[in-house]
Image (cartoon, grey):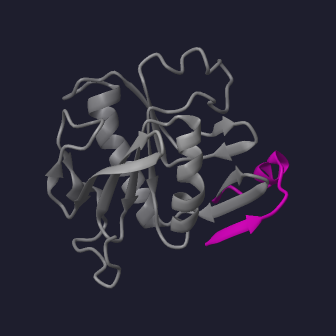
Amino acid sequence: MVCVKKRATYADLEALSAEWVGELIGDGLVARRRSVRHQFTCTRLLHLLVRAFDLGFDGPGGWCLLPAPELRFGRDVLVPDLAGWRQGRIADDVGRDAHFVSTAPDWLCEVVEFPSAPADRELKLPLYHCMGVGLVWVIDPLRCTVEVYRRQAGGWLCTEFHEGRSPVHAEPFGDVPLELGLLWMSDRPVECLPSR
C-alpha cells in the first residue's frame, strides 16, 4: 500500500508508525509498507554484497553498504532499499550521531513491487540522476528480474537486464557472481506479470 500526502514536512515523516517507510519528494509525502517478499530480497542481497564488497570476504571489498539509508538532498528525503559508497566517500559526511547522508551514493538499489513501482521509477529515478548517483539497480522480486542503469548526461541508460535464477556479473559488483536464485522467495516468477 502507498499513501501520498501533499504539502508535507519532515514532521510528517517522524509521525509515521514503524511499519511505514516515508519519503519527501518535492513537497509531498510518499509512504509505503514493505511486503515480506520485499524484505526477503533486500536482506538476501545485502548479505551477499556485504560479505564480498564491504567486508572483503570472498571478494575485493572497498565499499560501504547500508540498508535503507536516509538520503537528504535539498528538500527531498529519499530512502532507497540499499545504497553503497566507494570506501572513504561518506566518512566526512557522517558524524558520530548522523541520521542521514547527503553524499550521493555510487550505487543504489530499489526493490520494486506494485503499487510502489511507479513512485520508484517515475519519481525517484529522476531525482537520483539529478543528485549524481552513478548506478541504480531496479529489482522486481515478482518477475525475478534485475535491471542495471548507468547514469548518462541525458538520463539513465539500461546497460544490463537479468532474469531468472542463474548467476550473473552485474556492474558495479561484477567481480563476484551474484546468484539470482538466492534473491527470490518463489521458485518461479509470477507468469501473469510480463517483464518489461
The quadrant of the rendering that contains the C terminus is: bottom left
At a point 62% along the width and 30% down the height, the residue shown is 101
Rendered location of residue 59, percent (x, y): 21, 28
The quadrant of the rendering that contains the N terminus is: bottom right
At a point 78% along the width and 49% down the height, the residue shown is 14
Looking at the rendered structure, the number of numbered marks drawn on it comes to: 0
Question: For this view, does 5 lie left or right of residue 158?
Answer: right
The front one of 85 and 154 is: 154
Give the quarter of the image for residue 6.
bottom right
Magenta range is: 1-20
At a point 31% along the width and 72% down the height, the residue shown is 195
In the image, farthest residue toward the left: 166
Q: Is residue 43 visible?
A: yes
- Magenta stretch holds residue 11: yes
Rendered location of residue 174, percent (x, y): 22, 37
Above or below: residue 105 compared with residue 189:
above
Question: For this view, does 146 lie left or right of residue 105?
Answer: left
Above or below: residue 27 compared with residue 191:
above
In the image, farthest residue toward the bottom: 192
Rendered location of residue 118, percent (x, y): 54, 67
